[in-house]
Image (cartoon, helix red, strand yellow):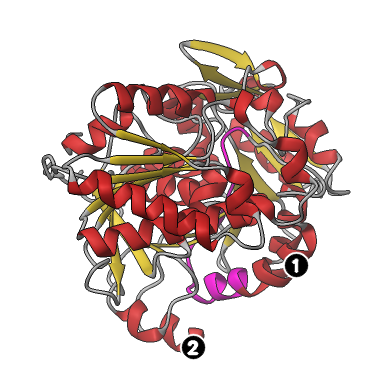
């Protein structure tokens, strides 16, 4: 694709990033674009022609699926992606992970991703920022905390993430968690250091020790600003590879605003309601369960799909039947919501885990269903729910890139996006990607109403 030629055509961007799932990738796009840093999210490394459409943007992302993949997959796929991102010459390249940090040595290995990043960008220390108060994620003295239904839990005691069906979080100290995934040593810039009068000197001393990964605490607005200051202060002429949640962008925007590097905050006009839209969900989260039940209560047509059929080798019949039921609901003027589970009790965890690639096939087949009903019914708005689901479902939609259509301040991390695609039926469609833990109970009806 001639990536070096692409990079030479425009000034270096402020930031590039690779998202380890699609919902997290739109989270970063929202955090940047809503603050005046125009951002495009590509659903793969773009052609030169596609890139040129967005050459004036200041941040570029690639939406990936590494959160649900093996270290071997990462070695094969992250290396060329990081090399392409490096060719753009941004001050910072960010490997974006979920703010709940759920990962394991065999699936979504964050330590392995950092090792690959260091192989591409050089062996300088890799800053790590996970806390993001905007989405109620906090790190304090290296430990991760996350909110659930109005209460904040240590991540290893979180009612959902401690029981994640694929990568349950059993350790809150992120340094210990990473020690199971990589031999790289992790140091810590804690809250006390960030608030000290000699923070810069103490951070410099830590960076000079040869520690390979440096976790920077973020627990509130002040420490987020301190983290952003340290991230930007430690950029290098050849670019700095960093890791973390969208807390990286939230922290950097604070510093960029202080330095006058951001534009005015743009105004996004709500698109207003649509009569019909479609939702597909592969999430087993209790948050998504409540959202599905609420949607059905307010008139959505609930359509349950057997995930084992979608995961099977002969899923075409299940795909066709689900699409038929959805199109029938649309013909009645109703919005279908197709789901493979209602909460964690409905998860076929053991069966799916024993079936290699089963969860990926579920996601891809949900994407096939959604594309079929969007094209046949002429829908202009849709939602995919589930972090891993979104990555695999969206790959079936024929979408090349996403830009921000409407940020959702009351539900950060799950914005309404505009799809850019070759197909006229898909191009310009509005789509939201919702992580399992994200959103209020009325999320789906709020998206249908088109109000921020």
Q: Which residue is mark 1?
A: 75
Q: Which mark is residue 212?
A: none
* Residue beneath the point at 61% across and 68% down: 82
In the rendered image, residue 394, in percent from the top left (x then y), is placed at 44, 59
Vertical side of 9 occupied by 12: above or below: above
Q: How many marks?
A: 2
Mark 2 neighbour class, 10 Å CA radius: few under 14, some 14 to 19, many 20 or more: few
Question: Residue 140 appears in which quarter of the rendering?
Answer: top right
Question: Residue 300 appears in which quarter of the rendering?
Answer: top left
- Is any atom of residue 184 visible in this view? yes
Q: Quadrant of the C terminus?
A: top left
Residue 82 magenta-highlighted = yes
Q: Secondary structure at mark 1?
A: helix
Magenta span of residues: 81-100
In the rendered image, residue 39, in percent from the top left (x then y), is placed at 34, 58
Q: Which mark is residue 1?
A: 2
- Is any atom of residue 39 visible in this view? no
**Depth check, front residue: 247 or 224:** 247
Instruction: Describe residue 270's horizontal placement relative to residue 227 as left or right.
Output: left
Q: Secondary structure at mark 2?
A: loop
In the rendered image, residue 124, in percent from the top left (x then y), is placed at 72, 58
In the rendered image, residue 141, in percent from the top left (x then y), is placed at 69, 21
Vertical side of 380 occupied by 147: above or below: above
């Amino acid at each position: 694709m001639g990536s070096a030629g692409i990079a030479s055509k425009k000034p270096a961007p402020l930031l590039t990033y690779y998202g380890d799932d699609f919902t997290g990738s739109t989270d970063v796009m929202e955090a940047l674009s809503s603050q005046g840093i125009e951002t495009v999210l590509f659903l793969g490394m773009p052609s030169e022609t596609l890139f040129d459409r967005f050459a004036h943007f200041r941040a570029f992302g690639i939406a990936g699926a590494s959160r649900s993949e093996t270290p071997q997959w990462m070695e094969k796929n992250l290396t060329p992606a990081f090399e392409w991102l490096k060719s753009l010459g941004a001050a910072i390249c960010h490997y974006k992970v979920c703010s709940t940090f759920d990962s394991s040595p065999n699936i979504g290995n964050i330590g392995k991703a950092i090792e690959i990043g260091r192989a591409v960008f050089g062996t300088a220390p890799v800053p790590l920022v996970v806390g993001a108060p905007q989405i109620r994620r906090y790190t304090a003295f290296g430990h991760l905390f996350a909110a659930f239904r109005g209460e904040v839990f240590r991540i290893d005691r979180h009612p959902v993430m401690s029981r994640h069906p694929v990568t349950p979080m059993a350790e809150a100290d992120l340094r210990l968690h990473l020690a199971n995934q990589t031999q790289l040593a992790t140091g810590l810039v804690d809250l006390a250091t960030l608030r000290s009068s000699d923070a810069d000197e103490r951070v410099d001393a830590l960076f000079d020790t040869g520690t390979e990964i440096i976790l920077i605490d973020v627990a509130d607005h002040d420490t987020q600003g301190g983290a952003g200051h340290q991230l930007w202060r430690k950029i290098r002429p050849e670019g700095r590879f960093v890791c973390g949640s969208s807390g990286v962008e939230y922290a950097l925007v604070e510093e960029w605003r202080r330095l006058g590097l951001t534009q005015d905050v743009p105004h996004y006009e709500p698109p207003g309601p649509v009569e019909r839209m479609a939702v597909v969900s592969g999430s087993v989260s209790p948050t998504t369960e409540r959202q599905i039940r609420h949607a059905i209560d307010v008139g959505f047509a609930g359509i349950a799909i057997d995930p084992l059929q979608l995961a099977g080798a002969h899923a075409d019949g299940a795909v066709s039947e689900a699409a038929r039921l959805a199109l029938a609901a649309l013909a009645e003027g109703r919005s279908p919501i197709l789901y493979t589970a209602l909460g964690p009790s409905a998860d076929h965890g053991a069966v799916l885990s024993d079936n290699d690639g089963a969860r990926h096939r579920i996601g891809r087949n949900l994407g096939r269903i959604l594309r079929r009903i969007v094209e046949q019914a002429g829908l202009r708005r849709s939602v995919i729910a589930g972090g891993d689901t979104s990555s695999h479902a969206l790959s079936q939609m024929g979408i090349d890139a996403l830009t921000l259509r409407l940020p959702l301040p009351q539900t950060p991390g799950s914005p309404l996006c505009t799809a850019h695609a070759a197909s006229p039926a898909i191009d310009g469609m509005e789509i939201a990607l919702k992580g399992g833990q994200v959103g209020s109970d009325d999320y789906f009806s709020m998206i249908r109403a088109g109000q921020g």
